[in-house]
């Protein structure tokens, strides 16, 4: 039976949306047998986290932190899934204006609370999005999907 990859992201002006589409494209590679859910953070909830065998979080950096929408997702789900998601592998992608490190650090800290395991280096794009950046997003999606499918994470 195919395993499950959840991609949760927020985007206000479209950059992280384009990144998420590329991550999704990589994850849906025909050689990988995995079911993928691509959801905006505001639409995702407890059932999605319980369903997932691995998770990719995507967000802009706002005021040195993750977007409020992604933080809200964490706030809405933490107690409900506590103890049921231990060890799930995750990684991140952040499309920021000129930094992005605050968003990555904030997600990492929260993921320690969930007992998730970071299994891939994040993709951090500060500034304009280039085709090569979208290629990196695609590679991240493929690497997560292939790793989960193969059971290496
Ligand atoms: C309210 C607000 C705060 C922001 N704060 C930061 C910040 O602290 N660091 C940074 O690198 N970019 C910051 N930015 C820029 C966004 O991260 C950047 O424009 C990002 O690409 C937006 O992603 P999106 O197009 O997916 O919405 C901020 C943007 C807004 C609207």
Image: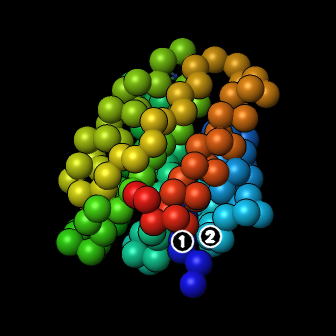
Which residue is tagged 1?
A: 4
Image position, residue 120 (x, y; %): 45, 42
Image position, residue 147 (x, y; %): 51, 57
Image position, residue 68 (x, y; %): 43, 44
- The residue carrying pointer 2 sits among few (fewer than 14), some (14 to 19) or many (20 or more) residues within 10 Å by Cα, namely many
Q: Residue 61 versus residue 29: which sits nearer the camera? A: 29
Mark closest to the chain's N terminus, 2 or 1: 1
- Tell whether circle 2 marks a residue whose Cβ is less than 8 angstroms from ligand 1: no
Image position, residue 72 (x, y; %): 39, 54
**SS at badge 2:** strand
- Tell whether circle 1 marks a residue whose Cβ is less than 8 angstroms from ligand 1: no
Quadrant showing the C terminus? bottom left
Examine the rendered structure and indicate whether residue 75 appears above or below residue 123.
below
- The residue carrying pointer 1 sits among few (fewer than 14), some (14 to 19) or many (20 or more) residues within 10 Å by Cα, namely many
Mark 2–mark 1 Cα distance, whole angstroms, equals 6 Å
Examine the rendered structure and indicate whether residue 20 appears above or below residue 13.
below
Q: Are marks 2 and 1 in contact (CB under 8 Å)?
A: yes
Q: Residue at x 69, y 28 (%)?
A: 133
Q: Which mark is residue 34?
A: 2
Q: Residue furthest bottom?
A: 1
Q: Residue at x 54, y 71 (%)?
A: 4
Quadrant showing the N terminus? bottom right
Q: Residue 42 versus residue 100: which sits nearer the camera? A: 100
Indicate left or right for 148 with 138 as reference.
left
Q: Is residue 73 visible?
A: no
Image quadrant of residue 15? top right
Colour pattern of the rendering: rainbow
Indicate left or right for 25 with 7 as reference.
right
Q: Can residue 29 be seen in this view?
A: yes
């Amino acid at each position: 039976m195919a395993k499950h990859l959840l991609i949760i992201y927020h985007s206000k002006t479209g950059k992280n949306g384009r990144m998420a589409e590329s991550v999704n494209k990589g994850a849906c590679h025909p050689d990988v047998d995995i079911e993928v859910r691509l959801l905006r953070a505001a639409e995702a909830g407890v059932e999605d986290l319980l369903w997932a065998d691995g998770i990719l979080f995507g967000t802009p950096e706002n005021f040195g932190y993750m977007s409020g929408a992604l933080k809200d997702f964490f706030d809405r789900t933490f107690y409900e899934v506590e103890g049921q998601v231990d060890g799930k592998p995750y990684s991140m992608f952040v499309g920021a204006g000129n930094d992005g490190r605050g968003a990555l650090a904030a997600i990492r800290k929260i993921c320690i609370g969930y007992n998730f395991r970071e299994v891939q280096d994040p993709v951090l794009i500060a500034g304009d999005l280039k085709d090569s950046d979208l290629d990196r997003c695609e590679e991240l999606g493929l690497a997560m999907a292939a790793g989960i499918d193969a059971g290496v994470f």
